[in-house]
Image (cartoon, rainbow, N blue to C red):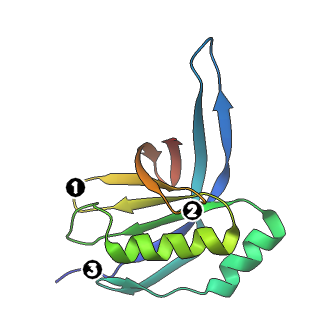
Amino acid sequence: MIDNEICYVLRGDYITIAPGKIKFTLCCAYADPALLFSGKPAEVDFDYKKVYAVEDECHDVVGFLHTHPGMSEAISSQDKKTMKGWVTAFDKELICIIKGKNRSQAYRFDKAGHWRRCKVYSRGRMFCIII
């Protein structure tokens, strides 16, 4: 039996580090247990009004984490469509972390709708994504 998908809202901030001539950006985030949603094996249902309220009040939503139970961490066409919708709604870039059967993968979605893979490090519900 395949587990149901779950989704957390990622809250955090971006940090730019420039040691010498090298410059990179990190997204430091945590999966907020107060914003945990579940669904079906290939679908997540969540309260978008609650997500908007958190963003409107705190301005610290940096993305979403969701599972692909029994599957890979590869991003699906539905994942891309959903993330592009959130990027448009929030008018800012967002991170999507997918926890697959064997590992996690982060993706960055910019305001133009483009996406790319990013390296993610995690411990529990804390995440560091190299942009």
Q: Which mark is residue 59?
A: none
Q: Pinpoint residue 15: horizontal percent, then vertical percent.
A: 67, 37
Q: Nearer the viewer, residue 39 or 19?
A: 19
Q: Nearer the viewer, residue 127 or 14?
A: 14
- Which amino acid, by three-letter code, is at mark 1? Asn
Please state if 102 lies on the left or on the right of 21 as rendered.
Answer: left
Q: Can residue 56 be seen in this view?
A: yes
The answer to whether residue 111 is above or below residue 48 is above
Q: Pinpoint residue 100: horizontal percent, then vertical percent.
A: 28, 62
Q: Pinpoint residue 2: horizontal percent, then vertical percent.
A: 21, 80
The answer to whether residue 126 is above or below residue 70 is above
Q: Circle 2 sits on which residue?
A: 63
Identity of the residue drawn at 76% across and 78% down: 53
Q: Which of marks 1 and 2 is nearer the N terminus?
A: 2
Please state if 83 lies on the left or on the right of 51 as rendered.
Answer: left
Q: Pinpoint residue 122: horizontal percent, then vertical percent.
A: 45, 45
Q: Which of marks 2 and 3 is in front?
A: 2
Q: Can residue 34 be seen in this view?
A: no
- Which amino acid, by three-letter code, is at mark 2? Gly
Q: Circle 3 sits on which residue?
A: 3
Identity of the residue drawn at 27% across and 80% down: 3
Q: Element under label 1?
A: loop
Identity of the residue drawn at 44% across and 83% down: 38
The answer to whether residue 78 is above or below residue 18 is below
Identity of the residue drawn at 48% across and 88% down: 45
Q: Earlier in the sequence, mark 1 or mark 3?
A: 3
Q: Residue furthest front?
A: 112
Q: Distance between the residues labelled 1 and 3?
A: 15 Å
Q: Circle 1 sits on which residue?
A: 102
Q: Element under label 3?
A: loop
Q: Distance between the residues labelled 2 and 3?
A: 22 Å
Q: Quadrant where the N terminus lies?
A: bottom left
